[in-house]
Each structure stands twice: as structure tokens, then as C-alpha cells.
Image (cartoon, rainbow, N blue to C red):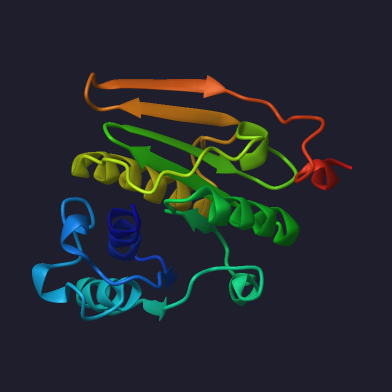
Amino acid sequence: MGCPTATYLAASGIGKINLVDFQKPELSNLNRQIMHFEEDIGKKNKSDSLREKLEKLNSSIKIKSFSLKVDENNISKFKESDVLVDCLDNFETRYLLNKFSLKEKIPLIHAAVEAYYGQITTIIPGKTPCIQCLFPDMPNKKDVFPIIGPICGVLGSIEAMEVIKVLLGIGDTLSGKLLIVDIKCMDFDTINFKRRNDCPVCSECFS
């Protein structure tokens, strides 16, 4: 979802965007990661490849690319961020990003996709439940899972809009709500969820 989310944020004029990814584009990525092209396969890492495309789209904003795998030792590089955007494909890093969001009190937009389905919520530290309230136990890791390309476009567009709403303080965000999207049946369902009183991650935000 990083490609559609970042593309709409850049086109909207978001002043500074940090792109973080250590992998290189692969052929299997191109059905959904629409800002990587065949000519990019195996050459540049994804953060640099995406930055180059976005700079051509909007040269008036600042875009930095970081070729690194986020971990506990380097995540502090991003503590000056106004919003964190989860376009991840694994829960290990997602849990880490969630903890960092709460520690630094930075809003976090979480989204995930698989096959024809997607989900998204907005986390406001100290006000809303966190990712670990929603997923108290880490889901089993899947080495390979199918994704139909357009679901990334749908969720990425919504994710960009949530970022814009948080930054501008407009509209109603998906805070405390989980939007579930099924594009195969074209169903959009929103469920409310609450903070877990025994959540070991966000309990300090409410103390």
C-alpha cells in the first residue's frame, strides 16, 4: 500500500514524506506496487525507486528515502514525524511501530491487505485503542499470501485520506473503528472496538 498511499500524499502537497523500505522491486510486486516499473526490478531499492517517481510528480515537497529494515535500534530516526503510516506486510514490525507511536505520541494509520480484503484504523495515542488491543496475539506469519492489486489501491487511498484528516483536523477519522473492505463482494463494514484494559502496550497512555 506504500505506493498508492505515498502517491496521493505527494500529489496532495504533504510537505515532507519519509519512505522506508530495504527491499528491491520484484516482478511479483508490480501488480500492486504501481510506482515500480519493469526497469526497476532488482536495481534500486523500493524507497529510492518510489522517491524518484514522486519527485517527478511533485517537485515542491521534500521526500527522503531510507533503505533500512525498521527495528528497535533505528526507529528513533522518525520521532519527529507528525503521522506514522503502516503499509507493512508483517506483524513483528507492525507491533514495533505501534509501540513507537504510543511512546512518542504520534498518530498511526494502520492498514493491511490480503487477497480481496483489507482493513484500516486510525490510532490516536492516549485516546483510542492500539493495534495490540485489536490483535492481542500476534497472528501466524505467512511467507506467501495472495493480493489482488486493486485492494491496495482502495486501502492506500483511504489511508492517505486518513493522514490528511489527522494533519488538518478535519472530518471524522477511523479512530476507535475498524473499516473492513471486501472488494470481491464490494462490502464495506465498520466495527467499533475498545481498548483492552489489560493491554500491556497502551495502558500507560491511559494511566
Above or below, comparing residue 198 to residue 36 in the picture: above
Residue 158 percent location from the top left of the image: 36, 42
Q: Quadrant of residue 193?
A: top right
Give the residue displayed 54% in from the left and 37% down from the top.
139
Residue 180 percent location from the top left of the image: 41, 27
Q: Is residue 130 visible?
A: no
Q: Quadrant of residue 111?
A: top left
Q: Residue furthest left?
A: 38
Give the residue displayed 60% in from the left and 43% down from the top.
123
Give the residue displayed 54% in from the left and 42% down from the top.
122
Total number of numbered discs in the rendering:
0
Q: Quadrant of residue 44?
A: bottom left
Above or below, comparing residue 33 to residue 72 in the picture: above
Give the residue displayed 42% in from the left and 51% down from the top.
89
Q: Is residue 191 left or right of residue 79?
A: left
Q: Nearer the viewer, residue 24 or 33?
A: 24
Q: Is residue 34 left or right of residue 115?
A: left
Q: Is residue 55 left or right of residue 111?
A: left
Q: Is residue 140 visible?
A: yes
Residue 68 percent location from the top left of the image: 47, 76
Above or below, comparing residue 205 to residue 135 in the picture: below
- Quadrant of the drawing holding the C terminus: top right
